[in-house]
Image (tube, rainbow, N blue to C red):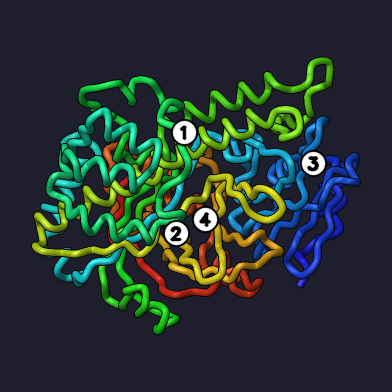
């Protein structure tokens, strides 16, 4: 079914320099003045807003090419598609040949999702909820966590990711994690995308985090971050694929906890550095691209392409570790409050990253890998369901899926109008949000987000993913 007033919409988009067509729920878009660029495809549920700014950003991304060689061969976007602050739309997926595009990842490198389950009933959890929350507030908000690392451990973390950190911790455990079951953490690394390890280089990390000797007290490690990042306690309330759920260790009635965070200040440091460096390498005398999105070509700067990918991998290793430590702090507190709780990892995956796939590289910005048989985690808002999915490897969408529901209203809009809106209008009735800043509840209110069920349904219908289990929110930590 076509959206209402489709022809009027398409004419309005054409006036903004966009050639847009629509068929079977998919919008195809390219810049009117760039007919040779690949058409980017956007899968949107019926009734979802079509945002011209986001379409323009995606068309610009599809049009990125380096004058010395390198181009985009495919671009698409997932149903949580919406404008990005840095010129690249959230939900964008781009496949490139002979070039990489650092801006297509940005500075929130390896932001991603992590999911654990625990054999606690909701009644057992709520019986000691207040004690648990107070201890977690200390760790997440007041700095009672101890993430002290040796210089060697920090270097290993950046260089080799989770396996490097584990090896160093086995040699010299430090901080809160002397109480961790390191054997369990080692076994769980198999349930992290790429085993939580990319080819990094500790010399590319911020200098203050990798001294030659001594101890490092990193104020950013094991922190949630701002924006839409969170740690949420949930309940598995419905299982759809029982055999697969059983194999993954999922059962109805279990407690679950989900972590959404990334590489924090390390990602900002590396992303910002390479934004400037990539622009500086643009051929002298050539006009800058109108989009201000600059690629790196393997033909003119192969060494810079390799250096960028290594720098991105360095930040990605930190992102994997940040989620692991956020989850481990929670698991340690669960054991303190509720006794011997195993709380195994189900999966951890990125949604802001460049990976070797297809003809060259696939870069995802607010989109998850969804390869055949791979777990995919798609959260709703803190007042809506989240979903554990299984990827189906749809090549039309570069083996990808959405990373959430997508914003419907900006934080500014909610903050400006929130004072006059009721809890019910914001969707906050019954929402248990743990935060030190009341404005965070309003900025991240359920009313800010698109309906998650429509986002899930349209991806299932498109053959991108299938539902394994549905999870309902219990309480959410927002920094």
Q: Residue at x 37, y 41 (%)?
A: 440
**Alpha carbon distance from label 1 to label 4:** 19 Å
Q: Secondary structure at mark 3?
A: loop
**Alpha carbon distance from label 1 to label 2:** 22 Å
Which-is-in-front pick, marks 4 and 3?
Answer: 3
The earlier-in-sequence mark between 3 and 2 is: 3
- Given residues 195 and 71, the one toward you in this image is 195
* Quadrant where the image shows the C terminus: top left
Query: From the viewer's perspective, is residue 23 above or below residue 206?
Result: below
Residue at the top extreme, as displayed: 285
Left or right, residue 92 beside residue 407: right
Q: Residue at x 29, y 40 (%)?
A: 222
The numbered mark at residue 379 is: 2
Q: Residue at x 63, y 75 (%)?
A: 461
Query: For residue 316, which quarter of the picture?
Result: top left
Disc 1 packing (10 Å; few <14; some 14–19; many ≥20)? many
Image coordinates for residue 20, horizontal then vertical, percent: 83, 53
Q: Is residue 220 visible?
A: yes
Left or right, residue 21 beside residue 388: right
The numbered mark at residue 267 is: 1
Query: For residue 289, which quarter of the picture?
Result: top right
Q: Badge 3 is on which residue?
A: 63
- Given residues 391 and 456, the one toward you in this image is 391
Query: From the viewer's perspective, is residue 431 above or below residue 462?
Result: above
The earlier-in-sequence mark between 2 and 4 is: 2
């Amino acid at each position: 079914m076509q959206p209402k007033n489709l022809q009027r919409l398409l004419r309005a988009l054409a006036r903004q320099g966009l050639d847009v067509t629509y068929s079977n729920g998919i919008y195809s878009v390219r810049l009117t003045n760039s007919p040779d660029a690949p058409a980017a495809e956007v899968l949107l549920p019926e009734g979802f807003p079509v945002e011209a700014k986001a379409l323009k950003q995606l068309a610009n991304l599809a049009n990125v090419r380096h004058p010395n060689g390198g181009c985009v061969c495919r671009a698409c976007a997932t149903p949580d598609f919406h404008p990005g602050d840095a010129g690249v739309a959230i939900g964008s997926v781009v496949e490139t040949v002979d070039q990489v595009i650092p801006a297509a990842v940005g500075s929130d490198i390896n932001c991603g999702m992590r999911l654990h389950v625990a054999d606690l009933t909701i009644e057992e959890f709520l019986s000691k909820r207040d004690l648990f929350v107070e201890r977690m507030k200390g760790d997440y908000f007041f700095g009672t966590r101890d993430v002290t690392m040796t210089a060697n451990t920090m270097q290993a973390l950046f260089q080799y990711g989770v396996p490097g950190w584990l090896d160093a911790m086995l040699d010299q455990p430090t901080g809160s994690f002397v109480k961790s079951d390191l054997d369990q953490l080692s076994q769980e690394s198999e349930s992290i995308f790429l085993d939580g390890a990319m080819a990094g280089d500790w010399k590319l990390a911020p200098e203050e985090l990798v001294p030659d000797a001594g101890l490092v007290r990193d104020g950013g490690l094991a922190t949630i971050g701002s924006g839409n990042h969170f740690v949420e306690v949930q309940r598995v309330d419905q299982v759809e694929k029982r055999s697969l759920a059983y194999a993954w260790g999922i059962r109805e009635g279990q407690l679950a906890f989900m972590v959404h965070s990334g590489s924090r200040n390390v990602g900002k440091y590396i992303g910002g550095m390479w934004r400037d460096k990539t622009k500086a390498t643009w051929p002298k005398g050539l006009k800058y691209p109108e989009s201000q999105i600059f690629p790196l070509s393997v033909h003119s700067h192969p060494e810079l392409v390799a250096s960028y990918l290594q720098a991105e991998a360095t930040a990605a290793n930190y992102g994997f570790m940040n989620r692991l430590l956020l989850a481990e702090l929670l698991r340690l507190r669960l054991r303190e409050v509720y006794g011997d709780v195993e709380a195994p990892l189900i999966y951890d995956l990125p949604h802001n990253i460049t990976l070797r796939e297809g003809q060259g590289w696939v870069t995802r910005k607010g989109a998850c890998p969804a390869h055949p048989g791979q777990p995919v985690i798609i959260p709703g808002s803190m007042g809506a369901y989240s979903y554990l999915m299984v990827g189906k490897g749809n090549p039309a969408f570069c083996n990808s899926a959405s990373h959430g529901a997508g914003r419907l209203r900006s934080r500014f809009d909610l903050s400006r109008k929130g004072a006059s809106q009721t809890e019910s209008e914001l969707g906050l009735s019954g929402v248990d949000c743990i935060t030190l800043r009341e404005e965070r509840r309003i900025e991240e209110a359920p009313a800010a987000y698109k309906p998650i069920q429509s986002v899930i349904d349209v991806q299932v219908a498109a053959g991108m993913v299938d539902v394994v289990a549905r999870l309902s929110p219990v309480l959410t930590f927002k920094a």
